[in-house]
Image (cartoon, rainbow, N blue to C red):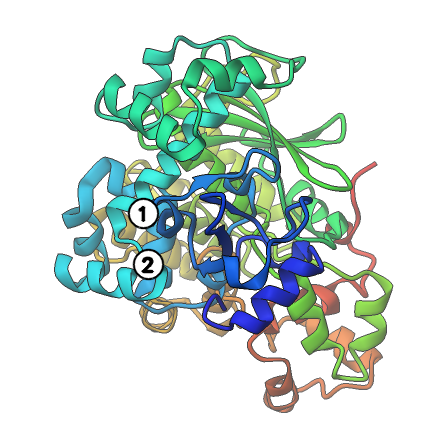
Amino acid sequence: MHTDTERCVRAVRSKDARFDGWFFTAVLTTGIYCRPSCPVVPPRPENMVFHPSAAACQQAGFRACKRCRPDTSPGSPEWNQRADLVARAMRLIADGVVDREGVPGLAGRLGYSTRQVERQLLAELGAGPLALARAQRARTARLLIETTALPMAQIAFAAGFASIRTFNDTVREVFALPPSELRARAPKRQGASTPGALSLRLPFRAPLNPDNLFGHLAATAVPGVEEWRDGSYRRTLRLPYGHGIVALTPNPDHIACRLTLSDLRDLTVAISRCRRLLDLDADPVAVDDQLRTDPALAPLVDKAPGRRVPRTVDEAEFAVRAVLGQQVSTAAARTHAARLVTAHGEPVEDPEGGLTHLFPAPEALAALDPESLAMPRTRRTTFTTLVHRLADGDLHLGVESDWPRTRAELLALPGFGPWTADVIAMRALGDPDAFLPTDLGIRRAARELGLPSTPAALTARAAAWRPWRAYAVQYLWATDSHPINFLPV
């Protein structure tokens, strides 16, 4: 979008928050860059240049605006609606792969050479993977500076910097303030300031309807791993350097996020995975406008706009749970998953009580006795095949997965039909166009709305909803009275 100067100027003049994260405005006369909704008086058009990423602004010598805080913008929805090289790379960078494995590790996961990845990112985003990861480290550092009382040296390494000097230089360059002054200017917040625990706000593009989002997560919560308590969804997190516990609370203008981490180096990854879980980088206006073009869906969208797709923090975990949920009720699926957690999950301590384990890793599940599984033999075969493929690395499910290819790999497994493959594509892999025409709830909703109810005919009708069929699924499911559609009381 940053190449459409006229459109960008209109967005800046109208201070349209819907475009925050889509592009950034760099002001030639002041040397700062802002989000489109910055509250200051817009500069003259000839003094504005537009960049596709904060990293590109920083590389061009601009510093972040102190008023609009462009580092706290929602992420671009482009990276969650595309499956090309750049989008997959951006999802991996957000997951901290460059900091942990370097650019060669990023390229290896994508199946391209380092040079190809750098060239593609530079062409589309104006910055290479190292610059993009550096901008992310700067955001994480600012968050820790402003929300914790940790010493600056600990913050530097927790944010992913190799040295304190690099940390100091980067913060000064990006924010035009030394770390100590950033902390002095930060508003005093109530809450935990002990190492490993902090509270923050997760921004999103309005509108956001929390009913089916948190309702689905709460209704399918696995005891010991997830729970709904005091208006918050809580769960354990398996992270690269340790584990964590997160509490997510819906608010009108943000999601309150309270994180307890065993290792603060996991902060960036934890935030990224929580945002993916709640689909917070979606563009609900674009989605709803497309779905409203169908007269059958328009009343559903108008009644409760801004529905998101409830996703996951662990793709392998969700795939296992999808198999456990084949042809059984939500309650039965939770019971099966809870047994696995009790027998094979990794115990963790929850300071608030209630959560007891991490969901078992594929390696742990691959070692269990199949005869101990209380399920039909055919589903037992499906389960054991899946966990062995995941444990051996023959099947990889991650943010960088190529959606069509991974779906084909899933369909090749015994016991995997279109429903299982598509629900994994929708909720684990993040494909916004995944569709479930064979789902009983979808077919029942289709009949009530006067839509075709056979899978083939419904799929043909749903072609007009592309590329947002996964969101159409949420609106169709919402016609039912199932608990997944309601915010828990």
Q: Mark 1 points at which residue?
A: 59
Residue 460 position by quadrant: bottom right
Q: In this view, does 341 lie above or below 439?
A: above
Evaluate if marks 1 and 2 touch, with contact meaning CB atoms under 8 Å apart.
yes
Residue 256 position by quadrant: top right
Upstream in the sequence, badge 1 or badge 2? 1
Q: Mark 2 points at which residue?
A: 126
- Residue 3 in percent (x, y) is at 45, 71
Callout 2 secondary element? loop
Q: Disc 1 vs disc 2: which is toward the camera?
A: 1
The C terminus: image quadrant: top right
Q: Which amino acid does label 1 sit on?
A: Gln
Q: Foreground residue, 394 or 414?
A: 394
Q: Foreground residue, 9 or 254?
A: 9
> Which residue is drawn at the image coordinates 76% and 53% (left, top)?
485
Q: What residue type is labelled 2?
A: Gly
- Residue 216 in percent (x, y) is at 67, 49
